[in-house]
Image: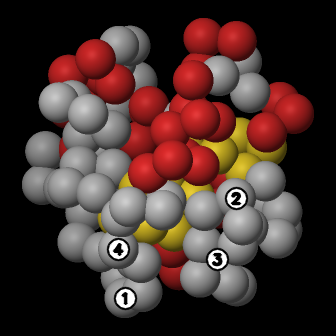
Amino acid sequence: THVVTEQCVHCKFAECITYCPVACFREAGTFLVIDPEECIDCGNCVEACPADAIYPEDELPPELAPALEWNARLSTELPLATTRVEPLPDGEQWQGRPGKWDTLPV
Ligand code: F3S
């Protein structure tokens, strides 16, 4: 599977969804996750993301590895991102900041 890491949090540029040929993205308020049961590993979303937030599972950097568990868990709880999600208005201010996952009440 591919995995959305914390670099998506507060950015949510939403470019990834339009490049996904299946319905694997799920939407939270400030980020997306990928449902590992739906992802076909096409990799289109990796290049599409301006925040470099998406990795193939086997290339996840160690510091971003917790994302594997929360993509799997949250994808069972969150709604499908079927239409194009509105990008967050201040997303660029958050781009590349470390520790964004810790800012969430999840
Ligand atoms: Fe997030 Fe990048 Fe998509 S910031 S919403 S994974 S384009």
Give the camera-side residue of 73 and 41.
Answer: 73
* Residue tagged 1: 83
Say which amino acid is labelled 2: Pro
Tag 3 near tag 2, CB within 8 Å: no
Q: Residue at x 24, y 40 (%)?
A: 10
Dot 2 or dot 1: first in sequence order is 2
Give the camera-side residue of 26 and 15.
Answer: 26
Asked if the residue at label 3 sits under 8 Å from ligand 1, the reply is no
Say which amino acid is labelled 3: Cys
Please provide percent x and percent y for residue 53.
54, 40
Q: Is residue 25 above or below residue 36?
A: below
* Residue tagged 4: 79
Q: Is residue 46 above or below residue 91?
A: below
* Residue tagged 2: 36
Q: Which mark is residue 20?
A: 3
Task: Name the mark nearer the viewer: 4 or 3.
Answer: 4
Say which amino acid is labelled 1: Thr
